[in-house]
Image (cartoon, grey):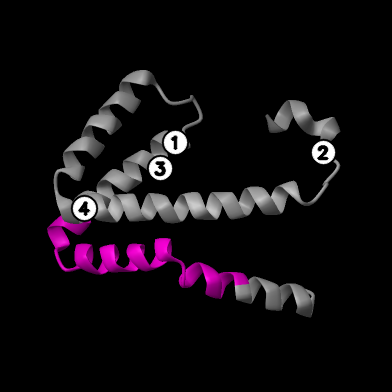
Amino acid sequence: MDTGIRRSVDELLRSLRSSSEYRAFEIARRRLDADPGKRKRADEFRRKNFLLQNSEDGAHAEAQEKMFLEREELHRDPVIGAYLDAELAVCRLLRQINIRLMDSVDLDLDSMEDILS
């Protein structure tokens, strides 16, 4: 990797780690880690949610509704809710960064649009 790019990536990582979103996530993670039972419940939900979001057959409405209800239930616990919200904020930040990076580079993918959509 080019030295200038490496320096820029390192700076981006420092900025990300010092962002309010990431700092809030770190605080929420420490609070969650203090209670192994809550950590386990949050991790089980995160795992199921990831699998649903990345399923080959598309997310079924029934499964999505079940996950929504489970998320609502977990949010009743302020420690788990704060963690899930903070995690989502960091993921959204990473997605915004990724979109900006991908939009800034023309990879000449027009001929592959049918398989990339």
Is disc 2 in contact with disc 1, using a CB cutoff of under 8 Å? no
Quarter of the image for the N terminus: give it. bottom right
Amino acid at the residue labelled 4: Ile
Instruction: Say which residue label 4 marks.
Output: 80
Instruction: Say which residue label 1 marks.
Output: 53
Instruction: Say which residue label 2 marks.
Output: 109
Compared across the picture, whether 21 is left or right of 65 comes to right
> Marks 1 and 3, how far apart in space?
5 Å
The region drawn magenta spans 12-39
Residue at point 86%, 42% (across, down): 108
> Marks 3 and 2, how far apart in space?
27 Å
Is disc 1 in contact with disc 3, using a CB cutoff of under 8 Å? yes
Q: Earlier in the sequence, mark 1 or mark 4?
A: 1
Helix, strand or loop under label 4 = helix
- Let me know if residue 36 is in the magenta part: yes
Q: Earlier in the sequence, mark 3 or mark 2?
A: 3
Amino acid at the residue labelled 2: Leu
Tell me where residue 20 appears, x and y as whole percent.
41, 65
